[in-house]
Each structure stands twice: as structure tokens, then as C-alpha cells.
Amino acid sequence: MDAIAVVNAGSSSIKFSLFSVSGDVLELTVHGQAEALYTAPRFVAKNAVGAVLAEKSWGDGVSLGHEGALDHLLGFVRGELASHRLVGVGHRVVHGGVAYASPVSVDKSVLATLEKLIPLAPCISPITLRRSVGC
């Protein structure tokens, strides 16, 4: 079965939703978040009806960061959706400037343009953006 991931990386969290694709129908399969990434990281994933599938806490004073949280999230997704084929990833971008005011497919050119806009929202590093959109 095909799947689509939607990611929202904020300044200290990563929220995500995973959808199964059947024809033109998207069905929420898993959603959750990793939060407090630089102070007391916590991860939780829930199924479509809200039942907890996975939880992890790294404790107070731990700085997991976006990269560590993304590594954990990717490991979870690989295990949880092993029978699915990831066919798309959506990522919310804080500011697309005048070039991007609606959804676009991200390639190296789009990523280069978005990297020039980092001063508008400097909390997300280019490495995190590249890894989360797959460039």
C-alpha cells in the first residue's frame, strides 16, 4: 500500500501525520509529535482513533535537536509502515517569499531558493529541511 507523510518542523518540535493511499482516498494511519527537542524531548505516536502506539522520553536536560528527533521518527515510521511504500512527503514551510505562495514539488532549485529565505525564519536549519523533504 502507498503512504504519504506530512511533516511540520517547528522551532522545538516536529509534528507528523502519515496517510495510507487507496486510489484517490487518503486515510489517516498514524500521527504524533516530538516536542521539547532541546530541553526534555518527548515522542508520541497515535493511531487514527487516538490510541497511543509509541512513546519515548529522553529526560530533562537532554538536547535531542531536530536531527535526533527526525532519526527517531524515521525509525518509527520504517517499523510501523514496513508494508507501505512512501510515495510523497509534504512539509510546511514558514515563508516561501514571493516565489512560493502555494504548494510545490521540492527539488534542488526550490530548496536553494528556500535556503535564501532562512533569515525570515532562522530556527529551522537547512540540513533539517533537506532531510525532511528528501533532497
Image (tube, helix red, strand yellow):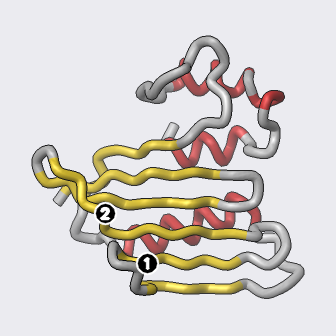
Q: Which mark is residue 28?
A: 2
Q: Quadrant of residue 81?
A: bottom left
> Reading the chain from its start, which is encountered first: label 1 or label 2?
2
The image position of residue 47, as x and y in percent, is: 36, 77
Helix, strand or loop under label 2? strand
Picture layout, residue 58 above or below residue 105 = below
Give me the C-alpha separation between circle 1 and circle 2.
Answer: 10 Å
Q: Residue at x 62, y 42 (%)?
A: 129
Q: Quadrant of the N terminus?
A: bottom left
Q: Quick one: which residue is furthest to the front in this view?
A: 49
Q: Is residue 20 left or right of residue 132?
A: left
Q: Residue at x 80, y 78 (%)?
A: 40
Residue flagged by tag 1: what amino acid is it? Lys
Q: Residue at x 76, y 70 (%)?
A: 36
The image position of residue 31, as x and y in percent, is: 44, 67
Picture layout, residue 127 above or below residue 72 = above
Helix, strand or loop under label 1? strand
Label 2 CA crowd tier, 10 Å (few <14, some 14–19, many 20+): some
Q: Which mark is residue 46?
A: 1
The image position of residue 128, as x and y in percent, is: 66, 48
Q: Quick one: which residue is furthest to the left in this view?
A: 23
Q: Is residue 40 left or right of residue 71?
A: right
Label 1 CA crowd tier, 10 Å (few <14, some 14–19, many 20+): some
Q: Nearer the viewer, residue 93 or 88?
A: 93
Q: Residue at x 24, y 60 (%)?
A: 27
